[in-house]
Image (cartoon, rainbow, N blue to C red):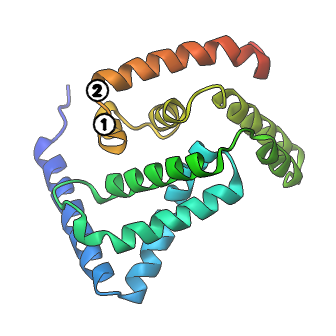
Amino acid sequence: MITPCVYCDRNRIMADLVMDDIKIQLLQKGDRKAINSFIDSYGQFMYNVCFKILLNIHEAEEASQDAVLKVLKALDSFDRKSAFKAWCYTIAYRTAIDYKRKIKYTSDLNTGIELAHYSLADDEVNFDESKKNMLALLSHLDDESRLIISLFYLEEKNIKELIKITGLTESNIKIKLFRARKELAKHASKYFEKV
């Protein structure tokens, strides 16, 4: 039986923290290459977080741009003991929730239409149809539960990471996961055939 190298994991974590620290220092100085690198490496993932909350391409783009700017402006308040990516995730999540409150978004029909419009080949149509069905199924959940389900199952985040991202307790996250799975099971047959 092979046991994981705890020492290697610690070294990797320390190396990540050092790299994050260097990135943050360059970003704070206004280094253009560092800013462009940050936007390239973190922009898409922040967009994904926003999209999972807003379910609208244009609103998610706006919210993610706002979240990127918030990160760049708030670098001085970043606690260097935690993971930079988790901090960015939290800012994107909270920004999307704020946008959701402001616009009172009620439907994901526009998203489905846009996804169908961009389909070019049969494989893409099937993929887009599955994606559209998944979004429609997830729309049965409240914003927080939808994000928790997406992070846990689609992005394979563990409970500890979810605690950092959402600020919820472990028991609260487990309860939300349980209730969300139950809610999704009730509606799944509407969107997907039994295999």
Disc 1 marks a residue whose amino acid type is Ile
Q: Residue at image x 24%, y 79%?
A: 25
Nearest to the observer: residue 69 or residue 4: 69
Q: Which quadrant of the figure has residue 138?
A: top right
x, y (%) of residue 164? 29, 43
**Label 1 Cα crowd, 10 Å radius (few <14 / some 14-19 / many 20+):** some
Q: Residue at image x 35%, y 37%?
A: 162
Judge whether residue 195 can be spotted in this image.
Answer: no
Q: Residue at image x 24%, y 61%?
A: 16
x, y (%) of residue 43? 51, 65
Report whether 23 appears left or right of 90: left
Disc 2 marks a residue whose amino acid type is Glu
The label on residue 95 is none
Marks 1 and 2: in contact by CB < 8 Å? Answer: yes
Residue 29 versus residue 179 in the image, above or below = below
Q: What's the CA distance linking mark 2 and mark 1?
A: 6 Å
Nearest to the observer: residue 120 or residue 143: 143
x, y (%) of residue 26? 29, 82
**Label 2 Cα crowd, 10 Å radius (few <14 / some 14-19 / many 20+):** few
Label 2: state its secondary structure. helix
Q: Which quadrant of the figure has residue 29?
A: bottom left
Residue occupied by mark 2:
170
Q: Residue at image x 66%, y 31%?
A: 139
Label 1: state its secondary structure. helix
Residue occupied by mark 1:
163
Judge whether residue 34 can be spotted in this image.
Answer: yes
Report whether 49 appears left or right of 174: right
Q: Which quadrant of the figure has residue 31?
A: bottom left
x, y (%) of residue 90? 38, 50
The C terminus: image quadrant:
top right
